[in-house]
């Protein structure tokens, strides 16, 4: 009888422990860095890049193969990149050797592929861009992105302490029950910043700021601009930036390439070319001058208005 009571008590304590910690290793995760301390990290903007950058992209299909190639063209002849991609891949999957990266063979059959551990150890990159899988709530609940952002950031700085590390904020399905724009308005603070970035920065061994490429915020701002204008050029609503409920088409890829350019280079994308090639060498759908100009202006407004991008306007 005593044994059974102890067994039931142990099971109850285990249940309470798991309830408090979540179903993954949430216990032991630091509290988010205080908001004032977080804001202080980004008070001084970064110096804009003086020449072409060498960039490493680690992520999934919201990075994609075409967007980094478009960015390379925007950055000019001296821009170069490598990447490792997957299907909905988490930072944890990319890090752990015993966790397969879904879609690895299909997504990495290109000349820019390079193993991330090997690449970062070499220390030759100016910037490393990391992103987490969405649904972001599930990634936070089950896959500890703050810990793997920490691991990848420190691996980057172990290779080269001067390399800038960026977290690429993305988005979720267009048909999300909470509302696509509502999620974009709320998720940056409640998930990307508070649950991932600010917890990562609270670790004692994270010695530098991690900057943000606010892709979701650019999407939201441009969606509202399209709504107000009743459409611009070939794009009538934000849904025309996607080929399904989450993956961008050529227009959306161009918008994200502009966003990466503005943040990584610290320069306005206004006036950049809009006739670009895709990763397979074929022409991307051309947004045309009117839509391209609207995208470029929106990107610069969002990026310079968001301090964790590390960018300020002139």
Image (tube, rainbow, N blue to C red):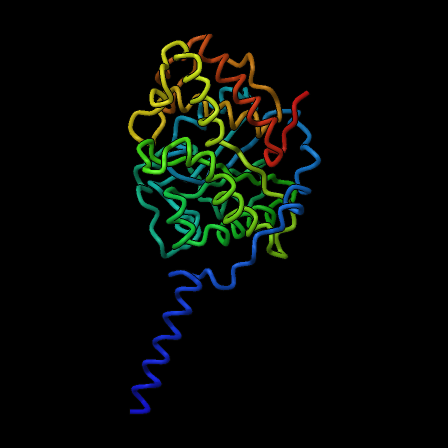
Question: Can residue 108 be seen in the rendering of this structure?
Answer: no
Q: Who's the residue at 40% across and 23% down the image? A: 252
If the image is split into quadrants, where does the N terminus sit? bottom left
Residue 313 at x, y percent in the picture: 65, 23
Residue 260 at x, y percent in the picture: 52, 28
If the image is split into quadrants, where does the C terminus sit? top right
Residue 27 at x, y percent in the picture: 48, 63
Question: Can residue 244 be seen in the rendering of this structure?
Answer: yes
Which residue of the protein is positioned furthest toward the right in this rendering?
44
Q: Who's the residue at 37% across and 36% down the image? A: 172
Q: Who's the residue at 34% across and 20% down the image? A: 240
Residue 159 located left or right of residue 10? right
The number of callouts visible is 0
Residue 68 at x, y percent in the picture: 45, 28
| Residue 308 against residue 234 in the figure, above or below | below
- Between 158 and 14, which is closer to the camera in this rendering? 14
- Between 88 and 38, which is closer to the camera in this rendering? 38
- Between 171 and 109, which is closer to the camera in this rendering? 171
| Residue 195 against residue 86 in the figure, above or below | below
Q: Who's the residue at 38% across and 24% down the image? A: 279
- Between 263 and 298, which is closer to the camera in this rendering? 298
| Residue 259 against residue 142 in the figure, above or below | above
């Amino acid at each position: 009888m005593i044994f059974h009571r102890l067994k039931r008590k142990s099971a109850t304590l285990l249940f309470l422990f798991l309830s408090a910690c979540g179903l993954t290793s949430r216990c032991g995760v630091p509290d988010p860095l205080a908001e004032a301390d977080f804001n202080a990290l980004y008070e001084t903007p970064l110096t804009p890049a003086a020449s072409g950058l060498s960039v490493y992209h680690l992520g999934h299909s919201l990075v994609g193969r075409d967007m980094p190639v478009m960015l390379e063209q925007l950055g000019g002849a001296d821009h170069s990149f490598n990447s490792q991609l997957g299907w909905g891949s988490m930072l944890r999957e990319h890090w752990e050797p015993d966790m397969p990266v879904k879609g690895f063979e299909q997504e990495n059959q290109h000349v820019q592929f390079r193993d991330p551990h090997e690449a970062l150890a070499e220390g030759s990159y100016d910037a490393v861009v990391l992103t987490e899988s969405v649904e972001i709530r599930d990634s936070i609940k089950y896959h500890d992105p703050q810990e793997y952002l920490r691991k990848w950031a420190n691996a980057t700085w172990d290779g080269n302490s001067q390399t800038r590390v960026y977290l690429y904020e993305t988005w979720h399905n267009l048909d999300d029950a909470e509302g696509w724009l509502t999620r974009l308005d709320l998720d940056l603070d409640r998930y990307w910043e508070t649950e991932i970035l600010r917890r990562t920065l609270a670790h004692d061994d994270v010695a530098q700021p991690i900057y943000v490429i606010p892709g979701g915020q650019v999407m939201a701002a441009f969606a509202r601009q399209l709504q107000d204008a009743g459409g611009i050029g070939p794009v009538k609503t934000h849904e025309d930036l996607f080929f399904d409920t989450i993956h961008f088409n050529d227009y959306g890829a161009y918008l994200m390439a502009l966003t990466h350019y503005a943040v990584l280079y610290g320069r306005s994308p206004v006036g950049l070319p809009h006739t670009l090639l895709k990763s397979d060498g074929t022409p991307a759908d051309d947004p045309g001058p009117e839509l391209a100009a609207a995208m470029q202006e929106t990107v610069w407004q969002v990026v310079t208005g968001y301090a964790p991008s590390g960018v300020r306007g002139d």
